[in-house]
Image (cartoon, rainbow, N blue to C red):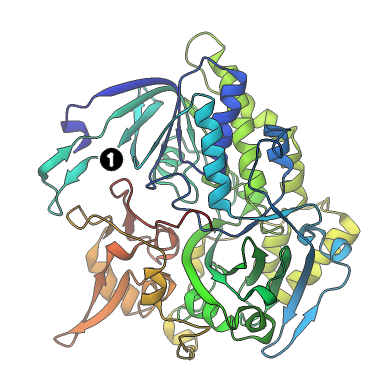
Amino acid sequence: MSTQIEREEMEFDVVIVGGGPAGLSAAIRLRQLMPEATICLVEKGSEIGAHIVSGAVIEPRALAELFPDWQERGAPLKTPVTEEKVLFLTEKRGFAIPFIDKLMPAMANHGNYVVSLGEVCRWLGAQAEEMGVEIYPGFAAAEPYIEDGRLCGVITGDMGVTREGKQGPNFAPGMILRAKQTILTEGVRGSISQRVMKQFNLRQGVDPQTYGLGIKEVWEIPAEKHKPGFVQHSFGWPMDDGTYGGAWLYHFGENLVSYGFVTGLDYSNTWLSPFQEMQRLKTHPEFAKHLEGGRRLIYGARALSEGGFQSLPRLSFPGGVLAGDSAGFLNMPKIKGTHTAMKSGMLAAEAVAEALGGEGPCEATSYTRRFKSSWLFKELFEARNVRPAFARWGNRLGALYAGIDSLIFRGRAPWTLHFRHTDHEALKPAEQRKPIAYPKPDGTLTFDLTSSVFLSGTNHEEDQPVHLKLRDPSKWLPVNWGIFRSPESRYCPAGVYEALEENSTMHLQINAQNCVHCKTCDIKDPTQNIDWCVPEGAGGPNYPVGM
């Protein structure tokens, strides 16, 4: 539809797609370097932070580089880490890992802060606007705008298109946001980032990306149980040895606890449900004792890029750059991506500023050089072998290798382990794996999917084209159902996909209005048959302010 509609245009020096830590840091750094530059940032959420679930541990290194006076400016980093533990879990017990700073230095959190990441992003957004950045929340960048083999900006999504794909009475065409340089910071599997990577062949010669699904809840617990700054991570149960995953629990804010679970999406058992694994872990004594007597406030989910160093694509291309989780800068052994996203955004901004200072359009090629000479490169390089070790040898041997890599090689082993396949290729047929019997929710510690999705505040305008479609509907019955018994009905953390029987025949029902924009279906579908299109702006989850 976009090529057949007359569109208004707005022109900027730089357009930034995505209002997370990377995009906001890029915008701020650009204004620091080029105070007169025109910078536009578009965010598909209803406001900055609307798509970011609270509760994270942040390393303030990049923030201190961006704003050396961040404390005087009132940055919302209020809860320093005061106590931490890493546990190996069996079904009933937890064993603390000693000497974390030596055996698992990536997990050490001295000097870090437990924060509401949504509040951090809102604060960064306010700083950017004060510096003159134009921020447009509720505007989804739907398509790349390419001219003469160069990215020249983006096209925002049309509004008021009916479910049948026709122009409704309130139709408003999207705009062309033209830019000399475009910075893509959409997060994991961003729609424009994926198209640009394919258009410019940015993944040639690098490992396939591997992902995790992080599912998170925020709880309010009794004041007498709250320990501000307490940080706990775990691995082991309920995952089997061949399935990567682990949990976190952070005390922060006013009697708040962030609890969450990450499942590596390279799992092979089609019967596995990341949501159910996350729920049943709360019954473990090491987690239940923190949550009992509390009440659940928020639920959300998001895919994570876990591939790290060897899965990074080429970072620059004609007309733009990739930063944050659009590129995959997460440090998985640390279970942290905020400081790396911010630093990548700052490096991208510096390269873009240099490119804009030249004559005529040119590629921001200095981005790669700047990255290679930064602490971000060193950090990801030293962490590069940990996640593929777990993928190759399982959890116990992977953990052993991680300890050896840290203690003996200090991340500088004379080899690099590689990822052998994409996540969707790892899934095994249903008949080759044993079904998992999950306990029923008790409504106190554990909950069903419907009540969970309600707490995400997710909403999509009903009269719009369905943004989740099967590219080839004929594949679902023989492949997804016939071979894998509908894995999408289990890996989706929002109940979007349901396998239903009608007239003795199975069919797939897609409840697109439930979607929390985690992108798991775009990653894990066994034939890559699910097409995740950008819905209208302001749709999706709406995580509350102040938590």
The residue indicated by pointer 1 is 157
**Rendered-image quadrant of the N terminus:** top left
Asked whether the viewer can see residue 365, the reply is no
Left or right: residue 383 versus residue 544 is right
Q: How many marks?
A: 1
Residue 430 horizontal/vertical position (percent) = 43, 83
Q: Residue at x 55, y 54 (%)?
A: 209
Above/below status of 156 relative to 484: above
**Rendered-image quadrant of the C terminus:** bottom right
Left or right: residue 151 versus residue 323 is left
**Front residue of this view, candidates 400 and 44:** 44
Residue 113 horizontal/vertical position (percent) = 71, 54
Q: Secondary structure at mark 1?
A: loop
Asked whether the viewer can see residue 455, the reply is yes
Q: Residue at x 54, y 45 (%)?
A: 121
Residue 11 horizontal/vertical position (percent) = 36, 20
Above/below status of 389 relative to 271: above
Above/below status of 113 relative to 155: below
Residue at the left extreme of this rendering: 169
Q: Residue at x 28, y 63 (%)?
A: 512
**Front residue of this view, candidates 506 and 117:** 117
